[in-house]
């Protein structure tokens, strides 16, 4: 085990310029040194050295890296998986990770090997008992998970839009999809928007910028929630309610119709919303605004006179993150005190902001049937100059009580434990 000695200046890597918030374009430039963050950790967190076993000490983890985690906890690299995305634990305790770029689903713990390959940008993973659901860019499939193998592939939904869809001509900003299954067997999956403000998504077949539902036992998928620009964060709360974390739009105009960087930096906030049948989250005609519960304002570039959608009539968004945070994976977990039950969200960090929104793993406490305010569970991935050495995607609780975090920028899986 390589446990880095403390240094006063930890080297970090320069973040690559990325496409829109939360897209599947996560290719990073080769790491180059830059100054470390001098910011003090938030209350309750401590700055600690990431533990890196020798066999995993390749860039950017070939130099000491500090993370901000709960005081008294540890964080260790347990696997290197280039472009690691979503994660799920199998009934036998194996940890699965999706890699859209290579078309693989990997088993990374207890040993690393390929579970599925040759898929079309596999992203979301979910277990309902011993059935594994995999969200590819163009379809949702299920498998029997038997003796550590995925067998008997069955199609749940197909013909989903991605960059290969003829009408999209090779351009799709949010092709990656997520999937969850309700206690009644209904399957829910996300279809992201084709672009930043592509209003035609709302009338496409199937509609894009939606959360879709397949009824128990199968059947055609129908919209469950609409106006969801990119809701890859999708999870069931302890009370059985369905929640999503949404990447909202970029380059939004201010109330006078001007696109100003100082306004864009902090508008609109990202949504963390409870989904009910027919819920409308406004995109691209309405944007959440203000502290949670956040009401909606008209988008002056797409809905100047309010005729497209009555934004004031939309129910407020239950919780939010800072503008351009780019929330990706979402899960619910029971953590040790002082946290308790709550939602874990992988915050990928911004591109559409003058000073980048920092990547982190966020925690939202679950209280009285709703989510409390955002708290940082794991931070320290970004230096003062905005460069980064990691970008979390998903965080899931393991059967051992630890939290396992995927990072597609560092190409790593971390184990966070008390």
Image (cartoon, rainbow, N blue to C red):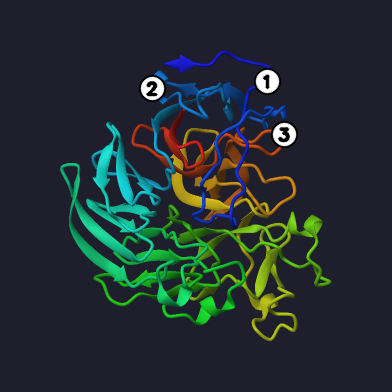
Q: Earlier in the sequence, mark 2 or mark 1?
A: 1
Q: Position of residue 167 (x, y in %)?
A: 45, 77
**Cα–Cα gap, marks 3 and 2:** 29 Å
Q: Earlier in the sequence, mark 3 or mark 1?
A: 1
User: Badge 2: how crowded within 10 Å, few (<14), some, or many (20+)?
Assistant: few
Q: Secondary structure at mark 3?
A: loop
Q: Earlier in the sequence, mark 3 or mark 2?
A: 2
Residue 277 vertical position relative to residue 152 in the rendered view, above or below: below
Q: Nearer the viewer, residue 27 or 276?
A: 27
User: Badge 3: how crowded within 10 Å, few (<14), some, or many (20+)?
Assistant: some
Q: Can you identify the residue that label 2 sits on?
A: 55
**Cα–Cα gap, marks 2 and 1:** 24 Å
Q: Are marks 2 and 1 in contact (CB under 8 Å)?
A: no
- Asked if residue 277 shows in the view, the reply is no
Q: Are marks 3 and 1 in contact (CB under 8 Å)?
A: no
Q: Quadrant of residue 131?
A: bottom left
Q: Can you identify the residue that label 1 sits on?
A: 9
Q: Nearer the viewer, residue 169 or 274?
A: 169
What's the residue at 31%, 47% (across, down)? 105
What's the residue at 26%, 37% (across, down)? 113
Q: Which mark is residue 384?
A: 3
3 or 2: mark nearer the eye: 2
């Amino acid at each position: 085990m390589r446990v880095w000695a403390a240094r006063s200046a930890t080297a970090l890597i320069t973040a690559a310029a990325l496409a829109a918030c939360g897209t599947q374009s996560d290719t990073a430039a080769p790491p180059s040194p830059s100054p470390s963050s001098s910011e003090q950790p938030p209350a309750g967190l401590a700055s600690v050295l990431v533990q890196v076993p020798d066999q995993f000490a390749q860039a950017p983890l070939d130099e000491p890296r500090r993370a901000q985690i709960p005081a008294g906890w540890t964080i260790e690299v347990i696997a290197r998986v280039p472009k690691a995305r979503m994660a799920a634990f199998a009934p036998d305790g194996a940890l699965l990770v999706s890699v859209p770029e290579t078309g693989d689903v990997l088993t990374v713990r207890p040993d690393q090997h390929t579970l599925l390959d040759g898929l079309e940008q596999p992203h979301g993973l979910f277990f309902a008992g011993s059935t594994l659901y995999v969200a590819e860019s163009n379809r949702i499939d299920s498998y029997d998970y038997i003796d550590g193998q995925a067998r008997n592939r069955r199609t749940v939904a197909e013909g989903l839009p991605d960059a290969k869809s003829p009408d999209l001509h090779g351009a799709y900003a949010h092709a990656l999809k997520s999937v969850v299954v309700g206690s009644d067997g209904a399957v829910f999956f996300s279809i992201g928007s084709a672009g930043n403000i592509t209003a035609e998504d709302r009338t496409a077949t199937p509609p894009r910028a939606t959360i879709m539902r397949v009824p128990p036992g199968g059947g055609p998928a129908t919209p469950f929630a609409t106006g969801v620009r990119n809701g890859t964060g999708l999870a069931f709360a302890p009370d059985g309610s369905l929640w999503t974390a949404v990447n909202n739009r970029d380059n939004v105009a201010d109330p006078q119709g001007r696109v100003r960087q100082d306004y864009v930096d902090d508008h609109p906030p990202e949504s963390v919303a409870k989904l009910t049948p027919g819920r409308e989250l406004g995109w691209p005609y309405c944007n959440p605004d203000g502290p949670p519960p956040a009401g909606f304002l008209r988008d002056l570039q797409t809905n100047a006179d309010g005729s497209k959608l009555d934004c004031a009539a939309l129910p407020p968004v239950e919780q939010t993150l800072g503008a351009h945070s780019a929330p990706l994976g979402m899960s619910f977990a029971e953590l040790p005190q002082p946290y308790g039950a709550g939602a874990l969200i992988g915050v990928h960090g911004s591109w559409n902001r003058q000073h980048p929104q920092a990547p982190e793993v966020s925690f939202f406490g679950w209280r009285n049937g709703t989510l409390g305010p955002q708290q940082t569970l794991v931070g320290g991935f970004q230096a003062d100059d905005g460069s980064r050495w990691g970008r979390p995607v998903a965080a899931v609780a393991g059967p051992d009580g630890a939290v396992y975090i995927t990072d597609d920028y560092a190409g790593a899986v971390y184990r966070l434990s008390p």
